[in-house]
Image (spheres, grey):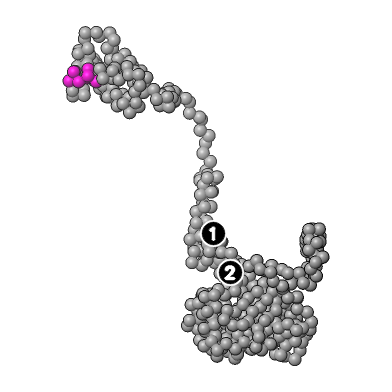
Amino acid sequence: MLLGLQIWFPRIDAQVNDTYSVDVGGRNAFFQFAQRRLSDVERNHEPLVEHVTWLDTDVTICLLGPARYPSPREWQSILQWVQAGGRLLLACQWDQAEVAIPGISAQVTQTQKPDNGFLARLKGEVKQGQKDSEDSKVKPEEKPTTDAAGKSSKLPPLPTGANWTSLMSAGNFTWKTEGVIDAPGAEVLVKTGDTAQAVRIRHGTGTIVLVASDQIFSNAALFEFDRPNGVLAVKLLESAGPSATIVFDESLNETGTPRVVGVLLDPMLRPVTIQLLALIVIFAWRGNRRFGGLLPTVAPARHDVADHTNSLGNLYYKAHHGNGVLREYLDQLKTELRLRYAAGHEQRVLAPIAREIRSSVEEVQRILSEAEAAARKPKLSRREAAGQIRKLARLRQASRANGRQARAAQGAPASTAGS
């Protein structure tokens, strides 16, 4: 199933109100309407700074409630393009309508949100005892608020009153907003009471249509058949100027949402991510499942003298008792060579071993003398003890090889006589 995702991968909704979203707040219905009515309607996924450099000036760019507003560098590129004759339609987010166009005296200010919910009442009851003295000095309509910069500011009240527009005669359209436009000298297109909600601004040879709320372009607003919301949305698009090419920008939606998982699922990195997931699944399965049929139950191995030897060696290693190991090994070697019972006849016993290792008897005696001297030391390093044992092991192997040859020579005449 994971490997099949390399061919077909479902679209993951990023929970943004873009032209792909068919949710209540999405723009898919408005995009499909424009795509059917006009000859050239497309989405832009490239950065705006790069996209507007080669874009023609007879095009309308639509920023309908973007997940983030343009940066100063993006504003500079957009305004230069508009000044050369471009057209821009910017609809602010309904619940975050706080934006200012740099270089132009036009901004959208967030209004006071209604405080009539249960959590708001509960918050007011908790803070009531702490602010009674302050509230008695300041009237409710004059209470200062604190903005993001920490400065005291006074938010305008929520727009109320009848809706009005100069784009059509009917005024019974639905307009939900939490912002107010302040643009001196701009042409007002939509008003709620006395507050401007949509204005048209001339900038150079181009046009900017600034809307305080993106609700009118949502799927829910266009679904209201008894309200001319769709007509007003199209009129706002046309108010930027006649254009056969419409570009709906999606780059601000893509870069304005959390990208912790989105980067791994990006079309460029998606194949690598899927292969990595497949390897993780196989690795987890290998650690918890068998490959092939069930194996017969194996009887546990019995402990033998090798386990005892390994345990004893580990104890000697941890105790740094190298001279003890060397002394035990040397005593065992003398017992096997029967040097304890050959006093004065050592050369006769060691001569076969010397021939086996192609050395002299004096050299063999020197090896044994050095091992005895090292074993008598009060403290012996593990490296030196290992070197002495390695030399003694060579003598032991030579003694055993000589014994096998002697037994083979003794058995040969008997076997020949028997044959």
Q: Is residue 138 visible?
A: yes
User: How far across and how far down the image is residue 166, in percent?
Assistant: 71, 90
* Placement of the C terminus among the 4 image quadrants: top left
- Could you classify mark 1 by the number of other residues whose Cα lies within 10 Å: few (under 14), some (14-19), or many (20 or more)? few
Packing grade of label 2 (10 A; few <14, some 14-19, many >=20) is some
Residue 131 horizontal/vertical position (percent): 78, 61
Foreground pick, 215 / 343: 215
Name the side, left or right, on which 330 lies relative to 230: left
What residue do we see at 76% from left, 89% from top?
170
Marker disc for residue 256: 2
Residue projecting furthest to the front: 137
- Under mark 1, the amino acid is Leu
Contact check, label 1 and label 2, Cβ < 8 Å: no
Q: Examine the image and state in which quarter residue 168 appears.
A: bottom right
Viewer-closest of 261 and 121: 121
- Which residue is denoted by mark 1 in the rendering? 2
